Each structure stands twice: as structure tokens, then as C-alpha cells.
Image (cartoon, rainbow, N blue to C red):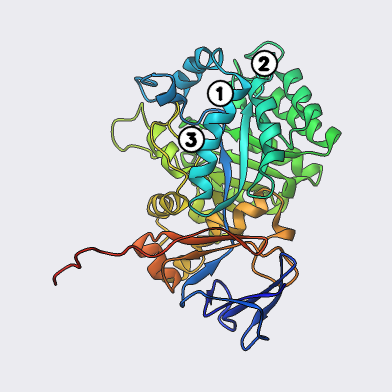
Amino acid sequence: MKKKFFNAKIYRNDEANQILVENGKISQIGKDLPDCDEEIDLEGKLVMPPYVDPHLHLDYVFTLSELGQEGAGSGTLFEAIELWPKFKETLTVESVKKLAMKGIREEVSQGVQHIRTHIDVTDPNFTALKAMLEMREELKDTVEIQIVAFPQQGMYTYKGGRDMVEEGLKMGADVVGGIPHYEPAREFGEQSIHDIVKLGLKYDKLIDVHCDETDDPNSRFVELLNALVLMEEYGTRTTASHTCSFGSVDDSYAFRMIDLFKKSRMNFISLPTENAYLQGRQDTYPKRRGLTRVKEFMEHGINVSFGQDSINDPWYPMGNGNMMNILDNGIHLAQTMSPPEIEKVFDLITYNGARCMNIHENYGLEEGKPANFIVLNESSVYEAIRKRVDVLASVRNGEFLFRKKEVEHDVALKL
């Protein structure tokens, strides 16, 4: 059955206001399209491809509240990592699935349809990975989940961590992960980068590294990662997440590296809310805010996206899967709000994230692609961002995942 969504403001397309859907795919986009058995009036609202969260820890979500912990007293990344093992001991496949479902529901109910999740594999039982492999299959019709085999406690800091990452890939993880700045010395951090790239090539997997999540400008593992994937022509399949220290390095080094990033075409993910909370803890003033060079990446055509990272876990007590909130914080911290920038910053939580996940060939508002999109409660990009508007509907394969009405007042504002 054909279905037509009409009276729409379509993101990146001023020439169309209707979407025709057939067999779960977009068959036509334009104006004055043929009549259909079912026609849905979108009332002039902004239609966008679904939000993408390319960096989330679904095995950690809600562990802070659920386990009755108060989190890291210092609010630092490294204290949170030290606290995690005692949390991990209590996990079961069922408990991970229960909390992860809460996190997934929060994200999907706010327009997310694609999630890349980093799952801790420094666990001899692979409890969380087993749970997430099940959920990836169970929820595939509602949300696409991509799994990173992530050694939270380090490939070398945790004995056997490198082999556990490899086993996670054999079990079915989609992406190779790492955390070089947490290894016990620079030599081991560098070795982990070599291992990550070798594993990616060996198993034909994507790569996503927690890279330089520190204020230390001498933490430059991103340089080695970029060099290796540049030489292997693997940059488009590789992502460097966080890269907070790159916001602290001097301009001479930064712009030399930006030129190399352009050559490798490696992707970047920034986590605005979490890193603003975690970083700069040892600073007095001026106080760093943990953001990589998002503005410069955008200006130089380097693919960069935003992610949630955490929801109520030892690293970050807040978070609710609202990508509009992530975007709002990110564009303030990155100072990307000129009129030309506003017109494209939605890409930071849509198209750019899809490119990080390497799903961009099958993503977006184009004929022949899956009929996946969201409807925002505004008619223009500028007003949607300014008002931080809600998602009124999410459509997947041509069917509503949810649809809700605008807020109605029992008593209207008397002005």
C-alpha cells in the first residue's frame, strides 16, 4: 500500500513538501505527488532524517541510580573508571537488558533510530556483550544498534584486555574499540592503537577509539591512529571519539594535524555535555570545557558529530537521550551559531553521525532509501534549534514508531 506524507518542510530540500512511501521505502519526494490510500498531513512541520547517537554506553545506563551509588566524588573520568569494576560484578544479562532498554526507550522516544554503543568487554564472562547482542537482534525493527567491543579498563591495564576485544569481535561486535590514554604508559597506549587497527583490518570491522579523553596536550594518540588508517586507507571506517586534548594543543600542531585528518578522512565524535562535566577538573581559571575543535573540523570539511555518551552512570549523573539537548550544548560550547552554521548544525546529530557509523549509504531523505524520518514541532531549522523543540513523530520503514500532539493548555497564557 502506498502512503503519502504531505504538507511537510523537508530538511535540505526546499523544492519538495511531500514524501511518497511504498513497501517501507521512499519512492518519491516532490510536490503534487499521486493520491494514495493513506495520506498524512504533517501540518507544515520540519521533517528530518532520524537522530543518530553514535556514542552511548548502554551497559552503563542508570547504574548510578539503580545500584544506589553516588558516583565519583571528584567528578573525574579516571575515578569513575576505578569505581566501575564493583558495579560490573553485580551485572547479569537480564539486569543489563533491563537498564539498557530504559536507555533505548528514552532515546527512541525522542527521535533516535540509530545507536552505536560501546560495551565493556574487560569481563571474562562477557555479560554485557551477550546481553547487547541479543538486544541488537530483538530490536532491529525499531532501532539499529551497532556494538563496539570496548576495553573500558584498558587492553594492557587490564590483563588480557586485548584478547578480550578480539573475542568480542568473534562473538559478533561490529566495531573495534580502545582507550589508549588509560594504558599504564605511552608505549602501551601506542601499542593498543596498533592492535586496534590490526584487528579492524583482520576482521573487516569499523574502528572507534576513545582517544585522548584528557586535558593533557601531550596525549596525542589521535596522531598515531590517523597515521595508521591513512596509510591503510581505512580512515572513512575509523572514528576518534572525544579527542578532548586536541582542544588544548597549540595551533601550529592542530592545523598540521587538521591537514592530515583531511587526507585520511577519519571521523570524529564529540560528547559536549559529558566532557564539559568531566574535563577541566584540575584547572582553576581559565577552565577548559573538554571540547575538541568542532568548529575547525566543520570549517575544513572533516566529519564530526555529537553523541550522548552516558545516561546516569558513574561518569555522568545526568543525560536523557535527548539529542536536541546535546546539540544545544554543543553549538554553544563550539560557538557555531552564525546564520550559515545554524543551517547545517543539525547534521551534527543526523547525517554526520550516520557517516561515523558507516550507514550513510542507506540513510537520509532520498528516493530509494528506507522511509525513516522524524517530525519536529517547528517549520524552520532556525526556530527548531532556538526553541529546542520536541519530536512529534518518528517514522520507521513508513510506519509510526510514535506520534503525539502538540502541547495543549488547559488555561492559555493571558498575554
Name the residue located 62 percent from the left edge and 26 percent from the top edge.
Answer: 180
Q: Which numbered mark, 3 or 2, is in the foreground of this view?
A: 3
Q: Is residue 274 above or below residue 29?
A: above
* In front of the other: 314 or 253: 314
Report crowding for label 1: few under 14, some 14 to 19, many 20 or more residues within 10 A (C-alpha): some
Residue 176's image quarter?
top right
Name the residue located 39 percent from the left edge and 19 percent from the top edge.
Answer: 68
Residue 223's image quarter?
top right
| Residue 334 marker | none
Q: Are marks 3 and 2 in contact (CB under 8 Å)?
A: no
Q: What kind of residue is marked 1?
A: Ser
* Secondary element type, mark 1: helix
User: Where does residue 304 sit, x and y in percent of width and height?
Assistant: 58, 52
Q: The C terminus appears in which quarter of the rendering?
A: bottom left
Residue topped by disc 1: 95
Report the residue that reaches farthest toward the left. Answer: 414
Q: Do the residues labelled 2 and 1 touch (CB within 8 Å)?
A: no
Question: Which numbered disc, 2 or 1, marks the residue that appears first in the sequence?
Answer: 1
Q: The N terminus appears in which quarter of the rendering?
A: bottom right
User: Where does residue 247 sit, x and y in percent of width and height?
Assistant: 47, 42
Residue topped by disc 2: 156
Residue topped by disc 3: 310
